[in-house]
């Protein structure tokens, strides 16, 4: 039997196995509260989880965009800087890729995500800007790129302004616990509202550059490419508004009064409204719960008197920029950013 590529258990009753050995989505019907428990927070990796020792780990900040390279040990992060905690949602840009392919009658390479590549946690750590400022950012600095200590050195740049934002964090803890190995121990970046690939795990190096940085993760992958993008690959940054129904796909329900629940997320923006309809009925407003903040999902629900038979539930969310989920999204060759309204199949029977 081959060695497992991840550390935490991934039982089928909680997690959806995509078949890669490193990528597992949460089952949408197994989301019990506002925060996603660590045992079912989705896993996305480009290589097996590295086993790192905090006693020998270090973080180096360097590049032509800093005046003096600096190196921090694990204890330095806990002892020398103010700690902050923030709740943030992380979603993979490939979430709902399988459903995207089904809508077009074609398949995609890449991780075969259903709807479960999303989760929300309380992250505790040090603001990235506090670490960068100790190195002395030059006036010409433009981009900041965290790099992982996994086997392939995953890395992705972001603009300096995003790196210095109040809510860009080097996280050391998750939901009140020391960061687990699969989720980035000893330290990971949390880039609020951006695609999950920007929130690099197992960080060991951060490059600050005075020139644009081009790596496979912003030129070949995690980009929009295809006939609707004639100018070439468009790197993905913030995520569009989308929604999730907390039911299996397809779902089976008993007849009678039901409460249908779900989540909606709008990347760097806040969700302001969620509507639903059953079959070909009118769109109606769902009830939203607090909080309703940027970069965090919102919970919604509606009451439904379910009649026996086959039904379709559709849900669409709107963000604070007035953007509403569309009926369809343009094709892209890598199957990213599927935020179209989904037709969720439901059978009601005793």
Image: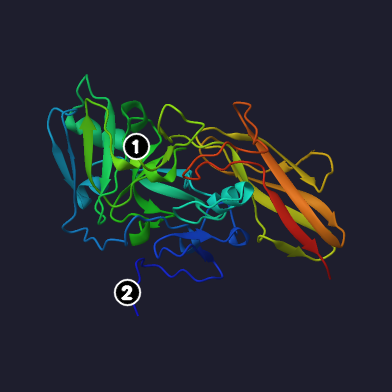
Disc 2 target residue: 3
Counting from the top left corner in percent of width and height, residue 250 is at 69, 61
Say whether residue 65 is left or right of residue 1.
left
Say whether residue 245 is left or right of residue 148.
right
Residue at screen point 18% across, 59% down: 55
Tell me if mark 2 has few (under 14), some (14-19) or many (20+) residues whose alpha carbon lies within 10 angstroms of its own: few
Q: Is residue 39 above or below residue 160?
A: below
Which mark identifies residue 219?
Answer: 1
Image quadrant in which the C terminus is located = bottom right
Counting from the top left corner in percent of width and height, residue 217 is at 34, 42
Q: What element carries label 2?
A: loop
Residue at screen point 23% across, 60% down: 52
Answer whether labels 2 and 1 touch (C-beta < 8 Å): no
Which mark identifies residue 175?
Answer: none
Sooner in the amino-acid sequence: mark 2 or mark 1: 2
Counting from the top left corner in percent of width and height, residue 37 is at 50, 59
Residue at screen point 80% across, 55% down: 311
Can residue 73 be seen by looking at this rendering? yes
Residue at screen point 35% across, 26% down: 161
Can residue 291 be seen by looking at this rendering? no
Colour convention of the picture: rainbow
């Amino acid at each position: 039997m081959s060695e497992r590529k991840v550390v935490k258990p991934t039982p089928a009753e909680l997690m959806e196995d995509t078949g890669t050995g490193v990528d597992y989505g949460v089952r949408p019907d197994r989301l019990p509260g506002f925060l996603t428990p660590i045992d079912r927070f989705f896993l996305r990796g480009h290589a097996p989880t590295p086993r790192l020792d905090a006693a020998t780990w270090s973080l180096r900040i360097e590049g032509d965009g800093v005046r003096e390279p600096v190196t921090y040990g694990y204890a330095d992060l806990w002892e020398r800087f103010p700690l902050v905690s923030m709740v943030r949602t992380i979603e993979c840009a490939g979430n709902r890729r399988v459903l995207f392919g089904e809508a077009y009658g074609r398949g995609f390479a890449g991780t075969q995500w259903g709807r479960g590549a999303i989760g929300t946690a309380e992250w505790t750590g040090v603001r990235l800007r506090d670490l960068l400022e100790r190195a002395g950012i030059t006036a010409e600095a433009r981009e900041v790129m965290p790099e992982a200590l996994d086997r392939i050195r995953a890395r992705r740049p972001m603009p300096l302004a995003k790196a210095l934002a109040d809510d860009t964090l080097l996280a050391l803890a998750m939901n009140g616990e020391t960061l687990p190995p699969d989720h980035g121990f000893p330290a990971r970046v949390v880039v609020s509202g951006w695609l999950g690939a920007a929130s690099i795990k197992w960080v060991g190096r951060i490059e600050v550059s005075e020139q644009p940085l081009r790596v496979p993760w912003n030129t070949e992958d995690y980009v929009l490419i295809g006939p609707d993008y004639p100018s070439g690959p468009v790197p993905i940054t913030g995520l569009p508004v989308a929604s999730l129904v907390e039911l299996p796909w397809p779902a089976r329900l008993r007849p009678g009064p039901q409460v249908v629940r779900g989540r909606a997320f709008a990347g760097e923006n806040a969700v302001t409204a969620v509507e639903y309809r059953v079959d070909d009925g009118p769109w109606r407003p769902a009830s939203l719960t607090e909080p309703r903040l940027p970069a965090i999902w919102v919970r919604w629900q509606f009451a439904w008197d379910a009649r026996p038979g086959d039904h379709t539930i559709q849900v669409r969310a709107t963000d604070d920029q007035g953007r509403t989920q569309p009926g369809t999204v343009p094709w892209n060759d890598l199957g990213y950013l599927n935020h179209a309204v989904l037709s969720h199949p439901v059978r009601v029977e005793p």
